Structures are given as C-alpha cells and as structure tokens.
Image (tube, grey):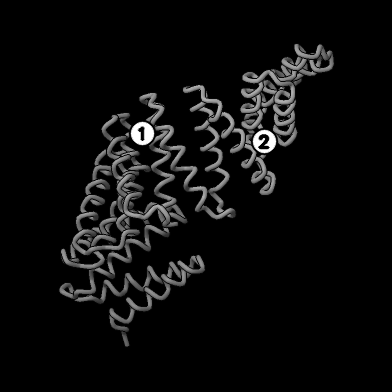
Amino acid sequence: MERPAAYLGRQAGESFQRYLSDGRPYDLDAAIELWEKAAQRSDAASPDLGDHLGMLGIALRMRFERTESRSDLDGALEAESAGIACSSQGSANLAMYLDALGVIRAYRYRLTREPFEIDGAIAAHENALLAARRAQSLPASTAQIYHNLGMDHWHKYEAEERSRDLELALEAWTHAVDLFESTDAERIEHALTLADGLAARSRVNNNVGDLRAAVALRADSFIKMSGRSPDLLAQYHHLGTELLELYERAGDPMDLSRAISTWDTAANIARALGGPDVSPTMHNLGAARLLLYQQTNRIMDLEAAIAAFEEALWSWSSDGPDGEEHRLSLAQALEERHRRTGSQSDQARAANLRGPAG
C-alpha cells in the first residue's frame, strides 16, 4: 500500500530536522527521497504540493553544498521554481522559497559567471523581501534575505566594479543590521558583513570615515562573540589590519596602539589554537610593533618587534607561503638594531636572511 503524500511529507520533515541537528548525510538523502515521492503523489491542486517541492529544492541545495554535484544544483533550481509556482501569494513559506531560489541562482552564477544568473538571484531576493513583508516574517528571517541580497550585489560589484553595486550591497546589509537591537546576538553576523563592505568602500574612495565605521562595528561585535567562536581569530585579523590602515592614513597614535593590542590578543588566540595561523599573526604583530618603534625610537619597541618576527619565522611551515616575507621583515628589524647597537651578529644574520640560502 502506497503511503499518502502528506505522510511522506511529514517523514521527510523529520529526517530533515535530524540532519540539521546531527549533520548525518543519510538523513538528508532520506528527506530528499521522501519529498520527491510526496511531490509525485500530490494532486496538482493540492495546497501541500508547493511545500513538498519548495523543501525538496532547499534539501537538494544543501546536498549540493556538501557534494558540489551539479545535478543536485540543477534539481534544486527545478524543484524550487516549481514549488514557488505552486505556492499562493499568501503562503507563509513563500518568502523562504524565494530566498532559497535566490541562493540557488547565486551558486549557479559562481559556477557559470552568467550575468542572468546573478540578476535572477537579485530578483528572487527582492521578491522574497516583498513576501516577507506580507507575511510579517520574523526579523531574523528578513535579515537573512537582506544579507543574501547584499551578497548578490557584492558578487556583481566584484565582477563589474560598478560603485552602484557596492552601494546596493551596503544598503541591503545596513537594513539587515537595523532589524536588530544593538544587544541582539543575531546582529553579529550581519554587522561583521557590513564592516567588511565599509572597509572595502574605504579602499575605493579613501574615506577614513568608512574605515572608522567598519572598525567600530567589528569591535562592538567582539563584545558579543563567544571566545570559542571559530571566526574570532579571523575577525581579529580584520580589525588589526583596519586599525593599521587607519594609522597609516590618519596618523593617530591611538589607532596604532589599538592595532598592537588587537594583534597581541590575536597572537594569544592563535597560539592556543596552534596550527598555521601563528606565523602570519606574529608577523603582523611584529609589523605593528616596528611601526611603533619608528614612532617612539625606543629600543624596547624594536626588541618586541624582533621577538614577534622571530616567532613568525620559527612557527612558519616550510611548505607554506610567506616565508620570504617573514625572513625579510626580520632582516629589516635586525639591521635597524645593528644601526642602533653596532651588533655585528645582527648584521651577519640579516645578511644571511636576505641571501639565497636565507
């Protein structure tokens, strides 16, 4: 006896929730198979058909994210488009399916670089926002749509370098941030994305105000981020880099001091985590401390820069990038100490680091 479509749909939903909880691939495979059968056994006029197809599209897209199978992505596009066509304008899930369609089209754009794909993604996300307003969706859901729309415009900006696309990306990300109170933890991801966009615009228009706004957003987000967040070290790298940029543009010693403090914290996180991040983190800390020495002319600041460069070099993986940069930075600092102290060993080691065998 064949199971009815409604039963299969419920079973699919349970498998899908198990996949979201535990990440076991066979639960996602089971959900896809069950939603396919539910859609096949649904009458064309069934109010559930749009949901079976819409969720099938989402599940196929998620499997594509794991396997990168083009057939899954093509199947996701077909199912999501059909699900939207079957859904009424008043459907509570229409915004979710339109958002999913936009994400699918954006993935296809990254694979094909066909402009019509990213334009389709933008149109889908704009329609998703309209549907979200009609359904009075939760702020978190609407914010994610704004985030995705901003990413669409960002991809267009990267491809075509039109300032209008960058402005539209920033506008969408600003809307995402504004949907939350400043104390909401859900605001963090959107605030960090907006910070990235503002920093990018500052490098285009040389606007220090954009860079300061990016730094403020990122620093504020750190207060709310878990100390165990896997993204924390990367965000400290961004903040340290932006503070050094501010110092180089505006010359405010306080920005350099904050940059050094940021890289110090990043170094502690990198050491605790271990792995390849220690070397670039220590190199950046050394570069910041060398800038401080150039400002203060204090030998203690030069010694701290050398110590950081030394750690960057000995923690560097011989098969990783940046080895030459690390050697040259240490050589520069040693040459500076030689000029201050007359140390012949510093001069000899600097020459060795700069040589072919360095």
Front tag of 1 and 2: 2
Place residue 135 in its image quadrant.
Answer: bottom left
User: Residue furthest toward the bottom?
Assistant: 1
Q: Residue 274 or 343: which is nearer the viewer?
A: 343
Give the x, y percent position of residue 273.
Answer: 66, 48
Percent from the top left, x then y, of residue 151? 35, 44
The one of 227 and 33 positioned closer to us in this rendering: 227
Q: Amino acid at mark 2?
A: Ser
As helix, strand or loop, the secondary structure at mark 1 comes to: helix
Quadrant assignment, res 335:
top right
Query: Could you say where residue 212 lies in the image, as x and y percent from the top left?
Result: 43, 33
Q: Residue at x 53, y 28 (%)?
A: 244
Answer left or right for 69 relative to 42: right
Percent across and percent down for residue 232 are 55, 47
Q: Quadrant of the C terminus?
A: top right
The residue at 29%/41% (across/down) is 171
Q: Which residue is mark 2?
A: 279
Looking at the image, residue 148 sits to the left or right of residue 42; the answer is right
Q: Report how far apart the C-alphas of labels 1 and 2 lie in the structure.
A: 29 Å
Residue for badge 1: 158
